[in-house]
Image (cartoon, rainbow, N blue to C red):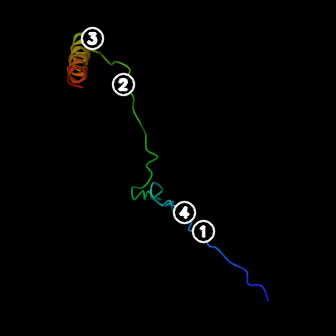
Amino acid sequence: MAEKKVTKKATTKSKKSTKAGKSKVKKINDEPSDGGIVIVDDDIVIDQDKVNEERRAYLEEARSQEAVD
């Protein structure tokens, strides 16, 4: 009888975790839905100077953050 030589190759497989970035989160809304009445005031006055000052402050902060990066 002739003997057959069997050679085994070592193979390595990397296993990736499929659960790494996928987590299911259930949002539970305990608050009852409110179908109440909403009153909108049409006489809204916007202080444009205040809005512009807030925009300037925001842009200045963004520029300073950009300079740090």
Measured in 3D between alpha carbons, the distance from the residue under mark 1 to the one under mark 2, in whole angstroms, is: 78 Å
Could you tell me which residue is drawn at 34 percent across and 18 percent down?
43
Q: Position of residue 39 (x, y in %)?
A: 39, 32
Mark 4–mark 3 contact, CB under 8 Å?
no
Q: Read off the residue under disc 3.
A: 48
Name which of mark 4 and mark 3 comes first in the sequence: 4
Mark 4–mark 1 contact, CB under 8 Å?
no
Could you classify mark 2 by the number of other residues whose Cα lies within 10 Å: few (under 14), some (14-19), or many (20 or more)? few
The residue nearer to you, when weighing 8 against 64, is 8
Q: Read off the residue under disc 4.
A: 13
Measured in 3D between alpha carbons, the distance from the residue under mark 1 to the one under mark 3, in whole angstroms, is: 76 Å
Horizontal placement of 39 versus 65: left or right? right
Vertical placement of 26 versus 55: above or below? Answer: below
Q: Position of residue 37 (x, y in %)?
A: 43, 40
Horizontal placement of 37 versus 8: left or right? left
| Res 63 quadrant in image | top left
Measured in 3D between alpha carbons, the distance from the residue under mark 3 to the one under mark 2, in whole angstroms, is: 19 Å
Could you tell me which residue is drawn at 38 percent across and 20 percent down?
42
Q: Position of residue 22 (x, y in %)?
A: 48, 56
Most distant residue in the right direction: 1
Name which of mark 3 and mark 2 comes first in the sequence: 2
Q: Which three-letter amino acid code belongs to the residue tagged 1?
A: Lys
Name which of mark 4 and mark 2 comes first in the sequence: 4
**Labels 4, 1: front one:** 1
Vertical placement of 47 versus 24: above or below? Answer: above
Q: Say which mark, if any, is on residue 41.
A: 2
Q: Read off the residue under disc 1.
A: 9
Could you classify mark 4 by the number of other residues whose Cα lies within 10 Å: few (under 14), some (14-19), or many (20 or more)? few
Quadrant occupied by the C terminus: top left
**Labels 4, 2: front one:** 4
